[in-house]
Image (tube, rainbow, N blue to C red):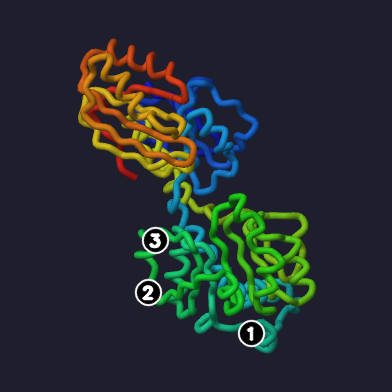
Amino acid sequence: MYQINTFNAIAQEGMERFEDDKYAINDTDDPDAVILRSKNLHEMPFPASLKAIARAGAGTNNIPVERATQEGVVVFNTPGANANAVKELVLANLFLSVRPILEGNEWVQNFPFNPGDDVEAIAEDHKKQFAGNELVGKKLGVVGLGAIGALIANDAERLGIEVYGYDPYVSVDTAWSISRRVHRVLELDELLKICDFVTVHVPLMDSTRGMIGEHEIAQMKATAHLYNFARGPIVDKDAVLKAINDNRLGGYITDFADADLLHHPKIRVLPHLGASTEEAEINCAKMAAANLKRFLETGDIVNSVNFPSVQMSFNSPWRITLINKNIPNMISTISTFIANLDINISNMVNRGRGDYAYTLVDLDELDRSKVENLIDELNKVDNVIRVRAIEHPGAFYEEY
């Protein structure tokens, strides 16, 4: 029986994937895995039993990923599960940037009409103050062409917008999904100089913190609008405020509330609505559950932010999973221990990521006591962080 603990409200459609005969939910303080959304785990000690954390969302800045890695805890996220929700919100704000829809509605609602007034005629007389522009032919720059950025680029192009994309690390799979009519630029400054709108979609890391700062904003048109639906610190808010107040930036829209950005006529602040749709929460919960089930039942790692993706068909009676320091001779050391116990290896795969490595070893062995003895021996090996044995589950994980 696997023990799963939850933080935050996780959509039932995801939790239903944990079968009652194999999983217990919130029954212990020593879970095998945790599934969460926004709960901050930085001050929470990890129990020795914890093997995995699944974030029902893309960002993992609420999880101490480095500490988890050092303790052999695999951290998963759900890339792409909320991409459509964020895409639609960005597109909605593109329309709001060129058409004063909200302002027009507020004017009509608050105009001091008198009883008997011809409301329609009065509104017609005043509508010129809410004239806007069209998006067709405007230039949009998308910084970061991951799951969200690629969707925005493709759909904006279909709206008749001229789209420019910047991502020096774009994956092959993403590259295939992006319309050939989206212009790829090799330098960020080039994109900033020509675009009327710039939207940022990169993860928050040390290398991206303050990625859009004074220098970058200085490259933009004075009429351009900057969007941040990724993470607040990616954009230097002080640089934004200074540029807007100096009339060097047309507007800023962010999905991350900050007291310093409130009540400014050229800044729109949203309460982190990007993934706040029923569909996105369900998709994230289902993918997070699938990630955990696959890992706990087969040892496979997919969508991890701290360990390499490793998958291998599970056809043997037992599988051993190992997390260890990524140093020379670890594979030979592991193989020697297995051979010394007269156990045959039927299949093996090893992948490294930075300072750590992950290994799956399938064993042609039916004797449970020999496998348990092997686990005890491997746990004594220097630089081995975590070892576990998985008996063939019979039924495999459900695909997301």
User: Tag 3 or tag 1, which sits nearer the N-term?
Assistant: 1
Corner quadrant of residue 111? bottom right
User: Tag 1 or tag 2, which sits nearer the N-term?
Assistant: 1
Measured in 3D between alpha carbons, the distance from the residue under mark 1 to the one under mark 3, in whole angstroms, is 38 Å
SS category of the residue bearing label 3: helix
Q: Which mark is residue 180?
A: 2
SS category of the residue bearing label 1: loop
Q: Which mark is residue 131?
A: 1
> Within 10 Å of the Cα at label 3, are there few (<14), some (14-19), or many (20+) other Cα atoms?
some
Amino acid, disc 3 = Thr
Amino acid, disc 2 = Arg
Q: Can residue 286 be seen at all in this image of the molecule?
A: no
Judged left or right of residue 215, residue 139 is left
Name the residue beneath numbered marker 3.
174
Query: Which residue lies at the image location 66% right of the left edge and 79% below the top edge?
Result: 221
Where in the figure is residue 257, as x and y percent of width and height? 69, 55
